[in-house]
Amino acid sequence: MNKLYGNVQGLKPSLKKRLGNLYRRRVPANRLYTAELARTLAELSAEAGKAVSILLARNGQVRAVAVGDAASLPVPEHAYIETRLSGYRLVHTHLAPGGLSPSDLSVLFLHRYDSIVALDVEEGRPTRAHLAHLVPPRAEEEDWRVYPPRAYAEYLDWDYQAVLAALEEELARQAKVRELADGSGERVILLAVDSGHGPEAELHLQELAELAATAGGVVVHRELVYRQSLDPRYAIGRGKLEELTQKAYHENAGTLIFGIDLTPAQAGEIERVTQLKVLDRTQLILDIFAQHARTPQAETQVELAQLRYLLPRLVGKGRQLSRLGGGIGTRGPGETKLEVDRRRINERIRRLERELEKIAKQRRTARKARKRNRTPVVAIVGYTNAGKTTLLRALTRKGDEGEDKLFATLKPLTRRGYLPGYGEVLFTDTVGFIREMPAGLLTAFRATLEELVEADLILHVLDASAPGALERYRGVEAQLDELQPPAPRLLVLNKADRADPFDLEMLAEKLAAPVVSAVKGTGLDELKRLVAQKLVLEGLPAQDWAQYDLGAQT
């Protein structure tokens, strides 16, 4: 017998069997229900003393049967890529008059059902029918249309399919209009959680917006939710999720991005409730890394980080592991690698680790060769999009122009430069840091970050124009302290041409750092002098010792 959902305790076996036989029913695709089905539902409901609900697919097949109200039915697996509706309609009984309840309409909206029908039952017979379906989103109207109650027989010849086709045509037209207005970007909603951090939480939401834009998303709504502690099931609470689902419907958004890391259970429950694609902060960052990985080394590192992240999430199948539609969160190893069993995933991880170890050995060999030549190495580090690549190009007069994107550089890039009166120096651009860098990325990019350990000087580049620059400075310094590179550090404030003069002066005084504009070229001569002075203090002699006052800076 097919599975019965809802409260079936206390029902006679014969009644359960008859309820299970509902799975054999078929309804014409252009009809809401048949007279025979309506009468059968009414009889079964009266005998059980409870509501009976069924879920019908568009081909007329019964997909689920439940004893209870509309919320008793399971959420069907569906992805509305080509349409905005789920492709299912719900028919259920009411033993008491009153029409469609708020709970019925909430189920209709949250699960994007094609329609919902409530049949009033009196003395074991169907009497009135109550019908509702979604409507195209409009600013000041309800998201559904509720029809006046009618005798249930009046809907038997109602051309349901024609109404549904017109509705989907209008939904598709509105979606097309917004797509043309926004371009080809994926429409996303952002959500950050403030657990008492105040202004810092606003900065984190702004950073999340930058990450989403870098990944190719079009941010249509962003929201900051205050919670002292996360809900273990829904993270931000079911009520807030339902609000965001409504917002997504009005904004034609299909993706919900959280500024926190979600547990596998939370991600699954949120996707089940909202029927949206759900990404957390780590998934978003991994997607950006995958998007910017253009070399075999970077691709290997990103794939390793993604597989390590996905491994504990391979329990069961959810929308987060079955994204055939593409978009943010789907780049990287690909669908076949995401759905293989745990053993094969582990084998792949071990093979990638061996490949990265080979890369690490090759880079160590190259570093030893540089040391034999006694060429000093300056590692350029900093928060992502701080202008490190642009500064490298300005200092060496070589290389590509930097991009105004987060994590544009994933592979260490080394260029030979010259410091006046000192000589040749190797400048190495490294992968950018970010607040609360996912541990899996730090591990996967170990070969890249080893450049810091072997460097003679670490040049920390801080974007002086960025909101929350001090917090970014502290975040990078904290991550450097964890890596424990032995080389001294030199801080430089970049993007002086964009920064507010007052903020720039305050940062320069507070952090005792030189100020430059890598784009305009201002301040570079002083920076080169300070770099050379630091190298001399580290015992790496210059061509002209007299130029550097060794007591000026320690």
Image (cartoon, helix red, strand yellow):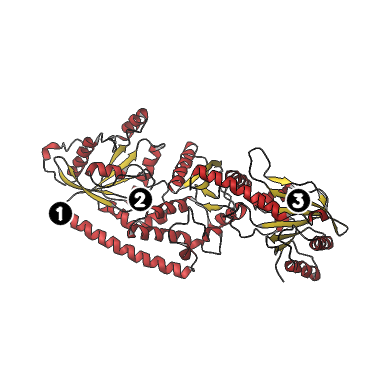
Q: Is 546 displayed left or right of 535 in the figure?
A: left
Is residue 248 something that shows in the picture? no
Q: Judging from the image, what secondary structure is the residue with disc 2 in?
A: helix
Q: Which mark is residue 482?
A: 2
Q: Which numbered disc, 1 or 3, marks the residue closer to the eye?
A: 3
Q: Which residue is mark 1?
A: 373
Q: Which numbered disc, 2 or 1, marks the residue closer to the eye?
A: 1
Q: Amino acid at mark 3?
A: Leu
The quadrant in which the C terminus is found is: top left
Seen from the viewer's position, the closer of residues 550 and 226 is: 226
In the image, what residue occupies the spot 59% across and 51% down? Answer: 234
Residue 529, image quadrant: top left
Check if mark 3's residue and mark 2's residue have beta carbons within 8 Å. Answer: no
In the image, what residue occupies the spot 84% across and 60% down? Answer: 46
Distance from label 2 to label 1 (Cα)? 30 Å
* Figure disc tally: 3
